[in-house]
Amino acid sequence: MPIDFHQHQNRYTYATRNADSGWAQAIQAIVAPHGALAEKRVADIGCGGGIYSLAWQALGAGSVRGVDFSAQMVTAAREKSAGVDNVSFSQGDATASGLEGESTDIVFERALIHHLKDYAACFAEARRVLAPGGLFIVQDRTPDDVALPGAPDHMRGYFFERYPRLLQVEAGRRPPVAKVEQAMRDAGFSQVQSQTLWEIRKTYPDFETLGKDLAARTGRSILHDLNDTELADLIAHIKSQLPANGPIVEKDRWTLWVGTKPS
């Protein structure tokens, strides 16, 4: 059954890793190719356990406000960010964030929109909280991103090869590039562009560590559609596909959409 983000046992599922340096480089190229982020106010809507809120802070953002609809996720994010300056978290919805109008310079939404049936209200809220000239950055996977074959550095592909019904789930919820671009334009954003990004999700010292992460379904909501027996079978299948020794680098391909709120 699908993950319940409000359950206590899922509190840390999106809080146990750090953002990849490749992601940071891609974001810097978009946001600050000629300068620092020091004065930028960032809203991370759908922040989960705060992984990317902290990544924005590490990039030098002036302030970061993370918003998530799950009280459990907000609690985990606050724990993860304890002692970090200029980062705060609150409970709110993608369509009613609780943030003040025109109070941010960047709105970032990662792995959020595939949970929504319609983007209009979400994107309208992003436009509302952005200051004129502000950037709206959406990161998610498209059907093309998730349909890539399995490989030692793209093990998500093995999920769908072993259990094709999972690909049907993904195809039904992942947004095509053009749909998101049009929804951003309809919401009043200009200069809308998109690009792909290969992001290292995590590096594991060995398969035992990876296997435990998969068994816990950590940060992989799609695995909640498998029962425990199926998940054990999938883990064994992935093990058979990977090199016997050495570290395992897990990558995923994403799409980034960027739009500007007109001044």
Image (cartoon, rainbow, N blue to C red):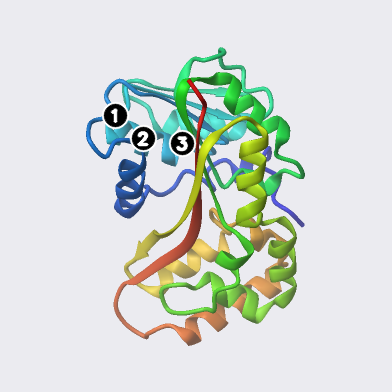
Residue pushed farthest left?
35
Judging by the rendered image, the residue that carries numbered circle 3 is 50
Whether residue 213 is visible here, answered yes or no, is yes
* Residue 118 occupies quadrant: top right
Q: Nearer the viewer, residue 33 or 86?
A: 33
- Of pointers 1 and 3, the one earlier in the residue sequence: 1
Judging by the rendered image, the residue that carries numbered circle 2 is 56
Circle 1 packing at 10 Å, graded few (<14), some (14-19), many (20+), is many
Q: Nearer the viewer, residue 245 or 121?
A: 121
For image coordinates 72% across by 43% down, the residue present is: 116
Q: Amino acid at mark 2?
A: Trp
Establish if 202 lies above or below 138. Answer: below
For image coordinates 69% across by 68% down, the residue present is: 228
Between marks 2 and 3, how big is the CA–CA gap?
10 Å
Residue 58 lies left or right of residue 175; in this view the side is left
Judging by the rendered image, the residue that carries numbered circle 1 is 37
| CB within 8 Å, label 1 to label 2 | yes
Establish if 231 lies above or below 28. Answer: below
Name the spot of residue 86 as percent of width and height, x first: 35, 20
